[in-house]
Amino acid sequence: MPITAQDQTWILETDHTAYSFGLNAFGLLTHAYWGPRLLTPEDYPPPVMGMNWASFNNPPHLTPEEYPAYHEMKFIEPCLKVTFANGARDAALRFQSAHIKPGDGQTSLHISLRDRAQPFEVLLCYTLYDGHDLIGRTATLVNHGTEPILIERMWSAQWHLPVGEGYRFSHLTGRWSDEFHLRREPLQQGVKVIESRRLHTSHHHSPWFAIDRGSADEDQGEVWFGALAWSGSWKIAAEVTDFASTRVSAGLNDWDFAYRLMPGESFTTPEAYAGYTPDGFGAASRGLHDFIRDAVLPHRHTAHRVLFNSWEATLFDVDVASQSLYAETAASLGVELFVMDDGWFHGRDHDRAGLGDWWPDARKFPQGLTPLIERVNALGMDFGLWIEPEMVNPDSDLYRAHPDWVLHFPDRPRTEGRNQLILNLGRADVQTYLLDRLDALLRENNIAFIKWDMNRAVTEPGWPDYDGEPREIWVRYVEGLYRLWGTLRQRHPRVIWQSCSGGGGRADLGILRYADQIWVSDNTGPVARLGIQEGFSQVFPASVMEAWVTDMEPHSWFNPQPAGEYLPLSFRFHVSMCGALGIGANITHWGEAERDEARRWIAIYKELRPIIQEGDLYRLRSAQTGSGFSAVQYVSKDKAESVLFAFRTLIPDPANLPPLRLRGLDPQARYTVEGFDGARSGLAWMNTDLLMPLLNFDSTLRRIRRVSE
């Protein structure tokens, strides 16, 4: 069985990896092992006993506890910090019980820890998912007493690396329109923190990490990695001690956070996932991709349709006639889903008014959305719509009626971002209003796709009339978001939802329980997108990554190709075909030759879609290194087909592009590679240098097929 219990030690085994912990001689729940799966339970080491290093560093401080609380002489980053009614601010957690719970597609281990003096309990849950080398962890605090407990920090998990030095920390950084830059840096003594304090996941950091011994690459080397399933403010802290121990913790951000847990109540953290692989960063990514497709996404392996989105073509200038014209053109190209973006609802002619009033604008749509939707459906396409439910413009009927519904502090100005304020989704009345409006919109219209946007970060995170602890808002808001979105999904299960927050500001495994796709960045410049999409792929599969072909202004700062020239349409399509293909260009301005080319690429994408969206991704050459030459390869799960994309940006001539080597093929099978003569074994192709003669701002797509003997 995947979980073995013996002598107060628990061994959690996946197909290829193992994680173990148990009670040491001091009675502390202590980490023992995390790495490759061993042959027998007897092979695993016992729980660690902390040594004694003078009175300043005693054994409890040096013990790698599974879930350390602030208590006694422990000076590491704790997972739990609470204050009790009597003024005590520590927690003495001791093991009480353990039980294994089998489930459908997963098995979980539940550990109960109780305080020596205070009437509360911490329940640790470890979940193993069938077929995946990942462990999910949550922690639940239960108040069994008669007085409230103030939670000041409660993280989901702390993970311990094998004792040693020289570890390297990988994470993703960025900013709006410039997301998902991969950073690798050595871990030194101290604490390295990445976080969001913005109420959403943020463009600046992602709740994901990878740790290696300093020499791993895409194909080899031990990698320990993890991600947090939370769509609000979060924190990941990697700590190295002076005793060669390294640990990484993940959970809710404790900055400005507190939560009053009343008697009889419980509080559960978001789930934190982590895994191990000996096969490099590429294998770590593929493990996450499979898990997301198999166990997280609402519609699992549903193929995502080629879409057209109206935003970059029309901005707010939408009506039945103009959108019908775009729909006719999109349908002629082979588009499967037509999405009308911002500008369709009451009073929405610009970004200074209308948010909150979620019904069709009577001037633009005098008969509602039905005539346009019927036209789109008659053209053979599904219809989708943009919304931004969490926001309100001061110039709106909703705000005029309910100015108290927004996040704000008493007697302080209400800071606007993009001319809008944030509705307090922690409030039940706000949730009810939005649920009623959006439910009616979906019931009354044949809508197959919703793009859910959020275009600002938090300010004045207050809830003046809340009778609880006001700093609970950081959790109450996200719980309200999940409750609203989850109820809409439950009532309208066929709808595909997309998460957008000014691009990639809400990209995490928490939101993917409600949304099937993520809008990766508002930057649709194809050169910049190569690097953005590569960073995104560290965590997320191609099926989740919506990518548009556009005519973004070529001399803009985030699209550094020669001024006055658009990149070839083939280059733009190839970049976007690496994910879930969409079009955001003004297709009515394209000439017939461009439309013919677009038809061809869309048809090819539909053939390749199962390989790209469902296959294994191999990053052959990085777009983030600045070399100007990058490549990615997708391989079908049965290894029968593969597709290679290679891109050259700006490299001064004369230049010799380095060769590529394929990956992921069946070594024993024989394949043909488009553009190269003959059939060879997968082993041969993966050990053969392939040269791609590309000019500046050129790209190529090569199909790879297994041939029968």
Image (spheres, rainbow, N blue to C red):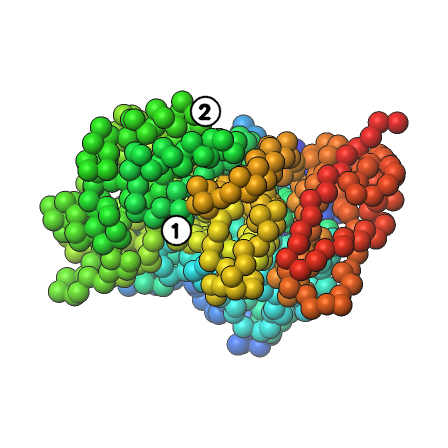
Of callouts 1 and 2, which one flags the residue occurring earlier in the amino acid sequence? Answer: 2
* Disc 1: CA contacts within 10 A as few (<14), some (14-19) or many (>=20): many
Residue 676 left/right relative to 201: right
Q: Is residue 491 visible?
A: no
Q: Say which of 593 and 55 sits in front.
A: 593
List the residue tagged with mark 2: 380
> Relative to 329, does residue 95 appear above or below in the rendering?
below
* Secondary structure beneath label 2: loop
Residue nearest the viewer, comparing 112 with 601: 601
Residue 691: percent from left, percent from top: 80, 53
Residue 365 occupies quadrant: top left
Q: Which residue is mark 1?
A: 501
Q: Residue furthest left?
A: 401
What residue appears at the point 58 percent right and 77 percent down from the top-left corner?
A: 54
The Cα–Cα distance between marks 1 and 2, rounded to whole angstroms, is: 30 Å
- The location of residue 96, given as percent across then percent down, is 48, 45
Number of numbered callouts drawn: 2
Observer-nearest residue: 600 or 196?
Answer: 600
What residue is at 64 percent from the left and 31 percent from the top?
A: 607
Which is more toward the observer, 275 or 437? 437
Please report the residue visible at 88 percent of the width from the left and 27 percent of the height from the top: 709
Instruction: Check the picture and name the quadrant holding the N terminus.
Output: top right
Callout 2: 10 Å neighbours few (<14), some, many (20+)?
some
Is residue 607 shown left or right of residue 356?
Answer: right
For residue 694, side relative to residue 291 (left or right): right
Kindly indicate the quadrant of the structure image that contains residue 527: bottom right
Which residue is at 52% across, 68% downward? 192
